[in-house]
Amino acid sequence: MRFYFVPIAAFCYVLLRTILPARIHPLAKALFALAAFLPAGRRFYQGAVLDGTVLPEAPAFVFGLLAFLCACLVFFFLLSLVRDAGLLLAALARRLGAARSAEACGDDPEGARFDRPETASLRSQGLFSGFRRLSGQLDIVLLFVSVFLAVVCVDRGCAVPGVHRVEVELPARHAALDGLKVVQLSDLHLSAMTREGWLESVVDRAMEERPDLIVLTGDLADGPASRRAADLAGLSALKAPLGVYAVTGNHEYHRDWPALRQAMPAGVRWLCNEHVVLEGPGGRFALAGIPDSTASRGGDPRPDPAKALAGLPQGMPVILLSHRPKAAVKAAKLGAAVQLSGHTHGAQLFFAGPFVAGSNGGFVRGLYRVGGLALYVSTGCAQWAGFAARLFVPTEIAVLEFRCRQDGVPDPAAPPRP
């Protein structure tokens, strides 16, 4: 819910700070206010108007328009904050400079120092003299910059993701994972906004890597299962020697999860607090998976890493699939070797990492070490249509290759398995 506060706050700030004070025709003000409200108030009207609770099923152009307007609003809001902070600092500096100039004239007759042109003007106009005038002139510039950023960033966000190769070094005790090649597809968010041929291109790029194993780490589709069945069918082209496995994300539970599960191709196996033992290039290892923490909405059990790993032989390396990265702390205590996650989209905007980290255990994107566990958080293949922009945080098809140390350095003892 807190993420819906951002566009509401942006709308209120832009409305009060820019739209209402603007010296333009009232009709133009109303149009600008409507354009800002459409993405900001989406949470409140979409259920009744667009047949949806979180993500409506609407024509692609509606998705595209809302995504563009939302990006414009957010970028204009952020740029306005920077502008206003700069103008405020400039006004304070001007005030301070004038005060110091007046103090330097202390030997003048009483009151003479305030007769100086610069200080008299400052006194009559106040601290924010010129502030409103200059900020109004900058509004047009900020609007054009926001539109440009929105067009570029939404287009980049909807593009086919590139391949991002990551080499993951593991302790020698996980030698069974040595040489294993895994393709991770996370946060596909298939919806009416997904461009034609997009999924086919993603699948082709994934298959070109010739992975040993393919994993899907949640948030595969948005919207009713009846509309997504044809989209999800494209996942049937994913093939790997060790199989294709998936876990649920929070978006799987926004609609009719049982129907969505039935729409998935038979070749994709879901893991729900369970594991399978696979024979990799270096030996036998376990692949485990847990559902999202919102699983109870769809009738699934809550995530239980201990149950997912229960019964495995001591010392067998485990790769855990979890949509949310913050499960890594518990997975490390249980002795898992690797966790693959998504959910964060890498924060989408390069400066938003600290805000996203707070609700995700401090993990945003890339490779982390949590005790003896290697955690990889994918930036995702796409994003939900509510905010589809990406700024210096590209989408990705993650290709992970595992290498085990052979340097003779003793490994820390693995924690006992439940």
Image: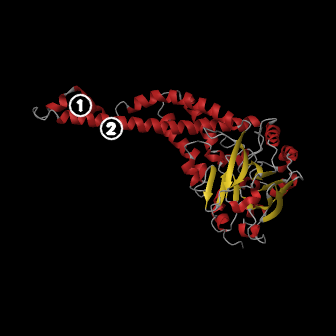
Residues under labels 1 and 2: Cα distance?
Answer: 14 Å
The spot of residue 170 in percent (x, y) is 68, 57
Residue 332 location, quadrant: bottom right
On the question of residue 34 being in view, the answer is: no
Residue 380, numbered circle = none
User: How many residues crowd mark 2 within 10 Å: few (<14), some (14–19), many (20+)?
Assistant: some
Disc 1, SS? helix
Residue drawn at 86 percent across, 47 percent down: 239
Quarter of the image with the N terminus in it: bottom right
Q: Is residue 146 above or below residue 264?
A: above
Residue 147 location, quadrant: top right
Closer to viewer: mark 1 or mark 2: 2
Q: Mark 2 points at which residue?
A: 92
Q: Residue furthest right?
A: 266
Locate residue 236 relative to residue 387 in the image: left or right: right
Amino acid beneath label 2: Leu
Q: Name the residue under label 1.
A: 119
On the question of residue 333 being in view, the answer is: yes
The spot of residue 225 in percent (x, y) is 83, 50
